[in-house]
Image (tube, rainbow, N blue to C red):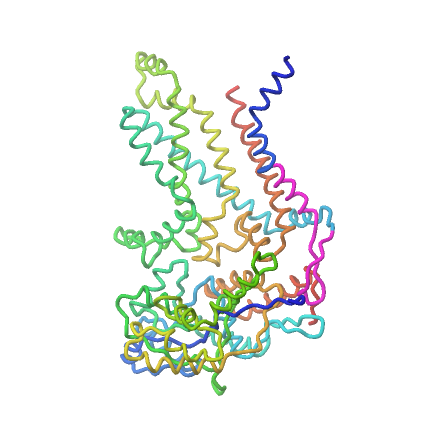
Amino acid sequence: MIRSQRWKGAAFTLPFQLGFVFLYLIPIGYAVHQSLFREQRSGLGLGGATVTFAGLDNYRHGLTDPAFMSSVLRVVLFACVQIPVMLALSLLLALCLDALTARAAARFRMLLLIPYMIPGVVAAIVWINLYSPDVGPLTSLGGFFGSAWNFFAPSMVWPSIGNLLTWHGIGYNMVIIYAALQVVPRELFEAARLDGASETRIALSIKVPQVRGALVLTGMLSIIQMLQIFNEPALFRNVTPQTVSDSFTPIMIVYNQAFNAGNYHYAAALSVLLALVLGVASFLFYRLTSKETD
Amino acid sequence: MQGKAYGVPTGSAPAFTILRTDIFRKYGLKPPATWDEFIAAGKVLKKHGIHITNYAGEDPSTLEVLAMQAGAHWYAIDGSAWRVNFQDSGTLKAAKVIQQIIDSGLNSSLSFADYAAVQRNYDSGRTATRQISTWQMAGMVQNFTKSNGLWALSPWPAFTGEPAKTPAGTNQSGGLTLVTEQCEHPEQAAAAALWMSTDTGAVSTMASPETGNGVMPALADSASYAEKSLSAKLLGKNYRPGKKVVTDSLGTVTTDWTFGPNWTAMFTELQTGWAKVLNKQQKVTDLLAHMQKWTVADLKSRGISVKN
């Protein structure tokens, strides 16, 4: 009886299991399988290619490919700057919302979520138009205040993309942090107020430590997202191709290898490597940040 | 069909120059017949803060088409192997023209990603000419507000002392409609493709820059569509003479250019280097030397035979 109940219980997870197998395990398995082969052409290269087993050659090539390694490093460094800034702003906004009445908070929450509802590619195109030194308003606005910034200048690529990502991601992260704030027991604030704590003190000493879990979660999601950044740099490549090379970020290399160079097998190997990097980074981040709360 | 792929060509891309007659008249310039005259005119315009052409950082096809016109062969089939040459006399001749334009600062460099800025730049007369084909004029017709009627066509500049020759379509223009083997109704699909490319009504619609996209049909009587592919709104009273420019350019198209088997990968590599050339981080000849080495190595890594 217990056994049959167990199966019944498990049957409820069937939709998830099916999705997991078909949408995750099989594609990943296929990518791993593809990454072990190599395409060889011969003669003029106009006939079909022969596919031969390559073992781990594609992985060896990827690990020694300076372009791939530097693209990972580039994105990690950028993540170290952009993610803390974005999360700090999201936290600040969530704290402000928390201080408002529930009705006002609901209204602002909606407004702040609007950027997140815009697809990433569209957001990038909108910002490219805003940044444009010729038709965008920002450069002339800057000129009015005495410094006409060229957002397309090579040195401005990261700040320009960072601003775009922060604008795009702030609302989403704020909602998660705000939801975490809502479940903090209100008695704690009351007790603190009776003890004479200011609102700032309450925010820093009670609210922020209580939403640590939400910050870890949003931080991890942001890292995962950042290592896979593609749309924004791919569009910025058009405006400063001398800085944003075709191998600027790991996914751009994968894309370029698969769809421009036609090296599907190498692209598969790089994808698997990137997934491993992501797994390790997420694991380390989770470990480092959750230890102290134990 | 019998192991070979056949396609129905959808269009060709006659090439010519489109220029601002008001600006050229104001500074006493004639439409440049050669690249030397083009550079000389560019230097005059520069004194008045006007660029003669726009080079987009992501688009090295300028180098490709000038090399093509100068008789270069980046890829050639030699027996059962490829011969790669990015440094032949044709390419170097093209490189010299481009390098002079960049070194003298005669070009604007707006990206097509910033499309509104590109069109406004032409519309407001900050860049005075464009090397162009019929299909590219649709964007001008649809976006200009100030300069309609001020544009005129002139033949694609020749290399000094050489007869007129125009580049063939690049990988970004011209085209074929192919029916794949997996297609469920291949005969019907092929008939549709043929209709699209040959039916007078269909090709006229596509040829117009207003209803279509200025696609010049690839037919024996292509020339008779020259008029349809032009816009009277854009060219004003220069509309009629424009027809002859288009018709003439159809007769001088380069026909011996070969696209290599790693063209797409090569072009991506060329883009990055081209942007550095425009940014004066390297010379065109540095880029060509790099492309030579890179292309040979890339072909070899795919197992393709290269003879050099």
Identify which residue, A161 or B218, lies in the foreground. Answer: B218
Q: Specify start and end residues of the magenta stretch as a single range.
A: A25-52
Q: Is residue B105 at least partly visible in the picture?
A: no
Magenta stretch containing residue A38, yes or no?
Answer: yes
Magenta stretch containing residue B147, yes or no?
Answer: no
**Residue placed at 50% from the left, 86% from the top?**
B162
Identify which residue, B100 or B68, lies in the foreground. Answer: B68
Left or right of B201 in this view: A104: left
Percent coordinates x, y for residue A52 in the rendering: 73, 53
Identify which residue, B230 or A167, lies in the foreground. Answer: B230
- Compared to B82, does A251 lie above or below? above
Left or right of A29 in this view: B164: left
**Residue placed at 71% from the left, 54% from the top?**
A51
Percent coordinates x, y for residue B143 in the rendering: 32, 64
Q: Is residue B181 at least partly visible in the picture?
A: yes
Percent coordinates x, y for residue A274 in the rendering: 59, 42
